[in-house]
Image: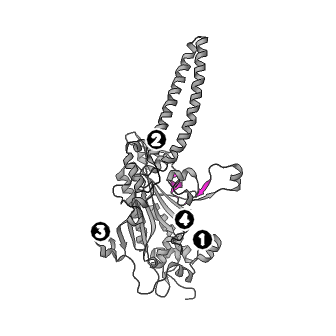
Amino acid sequence: MLDIKFIRDNADKVKKAIIDKNIDLDLDQLLDLDTKRRGLLTELESLQATKNQVSKEIPKLSAEDKKVKLLEMKEVDKRATELKKQVDEVLKEYEKLMYLVPNIPSPETPIGPNSVANVPWRYWSVKTGVVDPTKDKDKAKEVPAVFDFEIKDHTDLGKTLDLIDTEAGVKTAGFRGYYLKNEAVLMQYGLIWLAMKKMQEKGFTLMVPPILDREFAFYGSGHFPFGKADQYQVLTEEDKEKGVSEPTYLAGTSEPSLLAYSAGKTFEEKDLPIKFCGISPCFRGEIGSYGKDTKGIYRVHEFMKVEQVVLCKADVVEGDKWLEEMREIAESLLQDLKLPYRVLNICTGDMGAGKYKMYDIETWMPSRKDFGETHSDSNLTDWQARRLNIKYKAADGKIKHVYTLNNTVIASPRILIAILENYQQKDGSIIVPEALRPYVGKDVIKKSGN
């Protein structure tokens, strides 16, 4: 959420952001409501001031004058009641539109309508090391793994090695359901353990947050109203009987819970940054993605994720520093796993309303003959903090809203696609990444009986 004064003073910038981010919002309608809101509130304040003044005068008046004044005050009260009703109606629509106002993207953010305009700017593999594609396009092409045999995709590998069962998963859980089995389970939880230890070493507070959150947490993080249809609503029979007005929803990431933990708090600047790491199952409806990435376990309804969230002081340089640091943490984990990947600067039309600047990390997935998204790194400046009223007292004594950032440390099972496919061997076995061998208990996964 942007400050309304900023919106009034920078209407042209906000309108451009609305267009660039493909937001369905009429800013002039919001500004008209704001004018009406301020006019009504000014009149209400004037009426209250009149009442306060008259209340001081009444004891000094004669009985007759007092009677006249009391009658006048009845009319004032009547008008105030009418105004309060109007204010409530205007505020309801005003707040609805305010939740739709996007953040202004950074000057470095590419302008574009969708993912086609995203800009790859960093590649890595064991073979090439870090590659800047603007300086060496040919070397960037060497990053993806090359095989001298016909490869299998993760579904075939998973079925053959008894690691993944999507047929039973669909039977049990419906569309996009899956079971992880045997070494795939050990890999998943080994990945989570590696990620947790890395975050602990980086000074993050480890948390297992709630996965059932109230609406305010989703509105606060910006996942509502935009992604409301994509979250699973949980409403028990008891809730229905009690007429619960605010249902709970299964979170698609621990970000809403981690941010809501600090809702309404005011920190001291010396205590910033606040660094949280959430470990949780995640649930997403994947509304609108039917027919897209339906094969295997790339786009599923439930998965495990380790997420990092940072609250820092309201400074663009400080925010950018943490955006890069969180990216580096995620990259270091992929480098530990020796998986080829690239980093993209995400364009306006693909970044979401609240993002100021955003990177995606995509890991090479051989069967797709392309990179697939495994991490998302975002700086939202004070857009979320204003919604959740998260502030800090600056060194100069001023109260400001913090900047918030978030990034994926690891998410499974999607990362398993990259591991299984990049580490497959000609004989159909899979070499276990060295970093995961202590958790899997073996160096190679082979077909049973081999």
- Which badge, 4 or 3, is on the more N-terminal residue? 3
Q: Determine the image quadrant of residue 366.
A: bottom left
Amino acid beneath label 4: Glu
Contact? badges 4 and 2 (CB < 8 Å): no
Front: mark 1 or 3:
1
Q: Residue furthest left?
A: 135
- In three-dimensional space, the C-alpha distance between marks 4 and 1, rounded to whole angstroms, equals 11 Å
Amino acid beneath label 1: Phe
Identify the secondary structure beneath mark 1. Answer: loop
Q: Which residue is mark 4?
A: 286
Residue 386 location (% of width, % of height): 47, 46
Instruction: Give 222 or 317, whichever is nearer the viewer.
Output: 222
- Which badge, 4 or 1, is on the more N-terminal residue? 1
- In three-dimensional space, the C-alpha distance between marks 4 and 2, rounded to whole angstroms, equals 35 Å
On screen, residue 285 above or below 1: below
- Which badge, 4 or 2, is on the more N-terminal residue? 2
- In three-dimensional space, the C-alpha distance between marks 1 and 2, rounded to whole angstroms, equals 45 Å
Please state the extent of the stretch shown in magenta in the rendering.
245-260
- In three-dimensional space, the C-alpha distance between marks 4 and 3, rounded to whole angstroms, equals 34 Å
Q: Is residue 267 visible?
A: no
Q: Which residue is mark 1?
A: 175
Q: Quadrant of the C terminus?
A: bottom right
- In three-dimensional space, the C-alpha distance between marks 1 and 3, rounded to whole angstroms, equals 41 Å
Q: Which residue is mark 2?
A: 32
Amino acid beneath label 2: Asp
Instruction: Give 80 or 354, whichever is nearer the viewer.
Output: 80
Which disc is residue 48 wearing? none
Q: Which residue is mark 3?
A: 134
Residue 219 location (% of width, % of height): 53, 51
Identify the secondary structure beneath mark 3. Answer: loop
- Which badge, 3 or 2, is on the more N-terminal residue? 2
